[in-house]
Image (cartoon, rainbow, N blue to C red):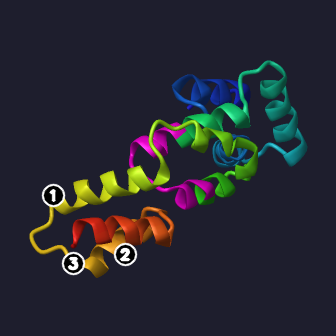
């Protein structure tokens, strides 16, 4: 464990992008003696030095989750847990290589390969938990379970 709170933050950011909320939680856990004001000063310093950016974090998270086959609703919910407004980075969803509907079809096809007895209901539940909207999920299920 790094003795210096600033080193803790920089070490975390060296591994991957983090949201401001995540870094604040890390500071609270690893350095509980720091006051809220001290934590805010440290976090503001990282932003000023361009070491931390919620925008970069959101872009990374969106790319990562889209590659995993997750739907927009689930990704937006995760962004919300980091207190990032999804409307600010919504254009990243539109810039994706595949449409939401195509990602839904791919995720369902991949899921079905590993199932012995897939049903329409299970497929819809799977897609719902992945964060795909009902119309895309229904379209994908109807295309596969003809």
Name the residue tied to disc 1.
113
N-terminal of the pair, mark 1 or mark 2, is 1
- The number of numbered discs placed on residues in the rendered structure image is 3
Residue 73 lies, in percent from the top left, at 57, 61
Q: Given contact means CB atoms under 8 Å apart, are the residues at marks 3 and 2 in contact?
A: no
Is residue 110 covered in magenta?
A: no
- Viewer-proximal residue among 92 and 76: 92
Vertical comparison of 122 with 109: above or below: below
Name the residue tied to disc 2.
125
Residue at 44% x, 53% y is 70
- Viewer-proximal residue among 94 and 25: 94
N-terminal of the pair, mark 3 or mark 2, is 3
Residue at 49% x, 63% y is 131
Residue 119 shows which numbered tag? 3
Q: Given contact means CB atoms under 8 Å apart, are the residues at marks 3 and 1 in contact?
A: no
Q: Main secondary structure of the magenta part?
A: helix
Residue 119 at least partly seen: yes
Which segment did they paint magenta?
63-76
Q: Tag 2, which secondary structure?
A: helix
For marks 3 and 2, give the CA distance.
10 Å
For marks 1 and 2, give the CA distance.
16 Å
Quarter assignment of residue 16: top right
Q: Tag 1, which secondary structure?
A: helix
């Amino acid at each position: 464990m790094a003795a210096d709170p600033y080193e803790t933050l920089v070490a975390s950011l060296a591994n991957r992008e983090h949201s401001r909320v995540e870094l604040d939680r890390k500071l609270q856990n690893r350095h509980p003696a720091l006051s809220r004001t001290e934590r805010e000063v440290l976090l503001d310093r990282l932003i000023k030095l361009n070491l931390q950016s919620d925008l970069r974090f959101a872009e990374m998270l969106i790319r990562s989750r889209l590659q995993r086959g997750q739907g927009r609703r689930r990704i937006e919910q995760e962004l919300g847990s980091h207190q990032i407004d999804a409307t600010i980075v919504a254009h990243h969803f539109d810039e994706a290589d595949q449409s939401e509907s195509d990602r839904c079809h791919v995720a369902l096809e991949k899921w079905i390969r590993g199932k012995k007895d897939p049903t329409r209901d299970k497929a819809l539940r799977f897609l719902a938990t992945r964060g795909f909207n009902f119309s895309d999920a229904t379209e994908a299920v109807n295309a596969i379970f003809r």
